[in-house]
Image (cartoon, rainbow, N blue to C red):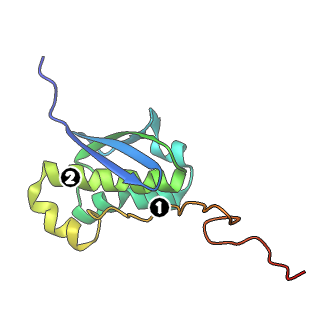
Amino acid sequence: MAQPEQYHAVGRRKEASARVFLRPGNGTITVNGEPADEYFGRDVLMMILRQPLVLTETGGQYDVYCTTRGGGKTGQADAIKLGIARALQIAQPDLRPTLKAAGHLTRDSRMKERKKYGQRGARARFQFSKR
């Protein structure tokens, strides 16, 4: 039997990366084998990852299955959001202007700054004493 069509995209944010699969369905979101509400546990994170679906009004058309690793829950939610937006763009190319105007196709490139030698952190110095 032929496999139903599926759209795949990758999203990243900080140290988190997410592989997102969109399949025609009724709107369920699964993250690492769990329902997304149970995995994230916070309504704010659920709101973040649903943004592209709400904006394009495709929430009930696709089931979202994603595997994510690295980073924290917030970074993972942002990575999934980018992955969903990219997969929607592949599934329906006419949605690209809407997603782009809302900023959902732009990867947030901000990363943690590295610690420098001779310092306590990335920018913090050791305490200075004249004597």
* Numbered disc 2: secondary structure: helix
Q: Position of residue 81 (x, y in %)?
A: 36, 55
Mark 1 crowd level (few <14, some 14–19, many ≥20, 10 Å Cα): few
Image quadrant holding the C terminus, namely: bottom right
Mark 2 crowd level (few <14, some 14–19, many ≥20, 10 Å Cα): many
Residue at the top extreme? 1
Q: Is residue 126 left or right of residue 18?
A: right
Q: Is residue 44 left or right of residue 116?
A: left
Q: Earlier in the sequence, mark 1 or mark 2?
A: 2
Q: Is residue 38 left or right of residue 124?
A: left
**Residue appearing at x 29%, y 51% in the figure:** 84
**Residue appearing at x 20%, y 52% in the figure:** 88
Q: Is there any visible trace of residue 59 in the rendered image?
A: no
The alpha-carbon separation of the residues under discs 1 and 2 comes to 26 Å
> Which numbered dot is residue 58?
none
Residue 52, image quadrant: bottom left
Residue 107, image quadrant: bottom left
Q: Position of residue 79 (x, y in %)?
A: 39, 53
Quickly name the residue at label 1. Answer: 111
**Residue appearing at x 45%, y 53% in the figure:** 77
Q: Please name the amino acid that badge 1 sits on.
A: Met
Quickly name the residue at label 2. Answer: 88
Q: Judge whether 23 appears above or below 123 on screen.
A: above
Q: Is residue 39 left or right of residue 17?
A: right
**Residue appearing at x 85%, y 79% in the figure:** 129
Q: Please name the amino acid that badge 2 sits on.
A: Leu
Residue at the left extreme? 94
* Numbered disc 1: secondary structure: loop
